[in-house]
Amino acid sequence: MPENPSPREQDAWRGLVLTAQLLEATLDRQLQQLEGIPHAYYGILIALFEQPEHRARMSDVAQRLRFSQSRLTHAVRRLEDQGLVERVQGDGDRRVVTVGLTHEGLQLIRRAAPKQAAEVRRKLLARLAPEQVEQLAEITAVLLEGLEEGWR
């Protein structure tokens, strides 16, 4: 039978979870106030922004963000209603749907990204020494590698 986590391991695990939750809530609150969208929707816009021509297949966006197809479809519908993205059916295969940023979506990213980056720096990165940032990057890479196994 596996051992229970030690008290220090529990501190590390719970601290990681709480840090992620509080950072997400902080970024979400900022985006809601500034742009009227939740942080999860901003993640969709950023994922599209980083693609050639700011477009991607819906299935690729869902995989990248680890969203279910239904969660992504709902979010994209809301973003479409706000004029931030547009969906296009595939020419050869009607099952393939591409989603892309509109001009308004691109403008939102250009307004919000510097503010989001500044908030991440202020709340997280500026509190760490440069060597701790490097350690954090290494630690999260190892953790993500283990967690990603179920998503491939």
Image (cartoon, rainbow, N blue to C red):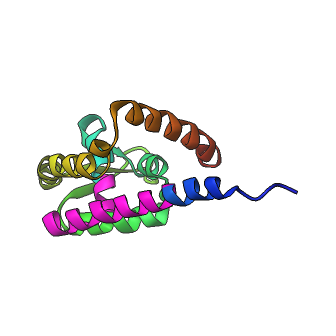
Q: Nearer the viewer, residue 12 or 139?
A: 12
Look at the picture and state if 12 lies above or below 129.
Answer: below
Rendered location of residue 41, percent (x, y): 31, 61
Q: Quadrant of residue 72?
A: bottom left
Q: Which of 139/109 is in front? A: 139
Quarter of the figure with the C terminus: top right
Q: Residue at x 44, y 35 (%)?
A: 137
Residue at 34 percent across and 31 percent down: it is 130
- Residue 80 appears in the picture as rendered: no
Describe residue 86's horizontal placement relative to residue 63 as left or right: left
Task: Name the residue rendered at 46%, 54% in the picture.
Answer: 95
Which percent across, then down, holds residue 131? 39, 30
Q: Position of residue 85 (x, y in %)?
A: 23, 56
Magenta stretch: dominant SS?
A: helix
Q: Which residues are magenta?
A: 16-44
Look at the image and tell me whether residue 150 can be seen.
yes
Residue 19 part of the magenta-drawn span: yes
